[in-house]
């Protein structure tokens, strides 16, 4: 397939450093806008439905901030990408830990076990109105994680700000990751393959 010669702009609707890094790695230039939504106000039983609904809600919130008329008039389309992620452990959806104690409980549970990340990407073409969301799931298996490693992780703090307190690329946790069935970029919150696919679809409309 011929690459599209259409120039387009990208807005990444996320404050996540990892997502910015992944989108930049993909070779795209973009601006960043963030949405504050009440994530707890959106509930779905299936994690796949939840992450897509949350990414869509973030898109809606960002669209409220944008002077839409401007985008309709511009020659080049602007694509807004939003994303969300949860961790699923023993069938239960996990969001960001609410405390250090909960983070400890979460990580202790992964020790010698497994968890999955379910990540969504939602694209909105501001020029055409095209919108679509998809999700990606990755299974992660862990070796036993020593208590002192969990303590260090919590002390260092990054795990307190991510879904399920789950990080696989952190130097402290890397030695205890047994197997990842899926891609690291998806675990980090922006599956490249889904992003590329949605980008193509949004431009073809």
Image: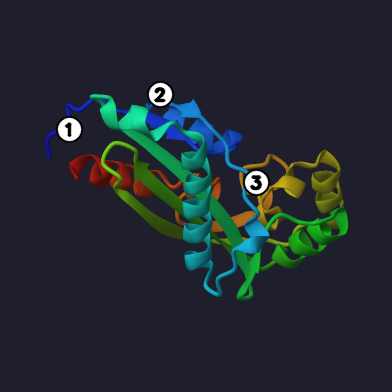
- Residue underneath mark 1: 3
Identify the residue at image location x=39%, y=55%. Answer: 133
| Residue 82 placement (x, y as % from top left) | 47, 44
Secondary structure beneath dot 1 equals loop
Quarter of the figure with residue 30: top left
Secondary structure beneath dot 3 equals helix
Of 121 and 153, nearer the camera is 121
Please tell me whether mark 2 or mark 3 is closer to you in this view. 2
Q: Residue furthest left?
A: 2
How many other residues sit within 10 Å of disc 1, few (<14), some (14-19) or many (≥20)? few
Q: Disc 1 or 2, which lies upstream in sequence?
A: 1
Identify the residue at image location x=54%, y=51%. Answer: 84
- Residue underneath mark 3: 174
Q: Disc 3 or 1, which lies upstream in sequence?
A: 1
How many other residues sit within 10 Å of disc 2, few (<14), some (14-19) or many (≥20)? some
| Residue 57 placement (x, y as % from top left) | 51, 53
């Amino acid at each position: 397939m011929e690459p599209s010669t259409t120039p387009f702009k990208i807005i990444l609707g996320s404050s996540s450093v990892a997502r910015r890094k992944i989108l930049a790695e993909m070779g795209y230039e973009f601006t960043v806008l963030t949405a504050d939504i009440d994530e707890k106000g959106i509930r779905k039983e299936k994690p796949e439905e939840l992450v897509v609904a949350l990414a869509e809600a973030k898109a809606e919130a960002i669209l409220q901030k944008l002077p839409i008329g401007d985008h309709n008039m511009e020659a080049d389309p602007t694509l807004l990408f939003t994303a969300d992620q949860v961790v699923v452990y023993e069938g239960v959806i996990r969001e960001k830990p609410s405390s250090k104690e909960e983070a400890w409980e979460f990580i202790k549970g992964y020790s010698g076990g497994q968890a999955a990340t379910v990540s969504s990407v939602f694209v909105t073409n501001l020029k055409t109105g095209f919108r679509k969301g998809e999700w990606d799931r990755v299974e992660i298996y862990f070796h036993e994680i020593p208590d002192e490693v969990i303590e260090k992780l919590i002390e260092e703090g990054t795990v307190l700000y991510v879904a399920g307190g789950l990080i696989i690329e952190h130097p402290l946790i890397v030695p205890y990751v047994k197997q990842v069935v899926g891609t690291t970029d998806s675990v980090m919150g922006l599956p490249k393959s889904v992003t590329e696919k949605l980008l193509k679809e949004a431009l073809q409309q």
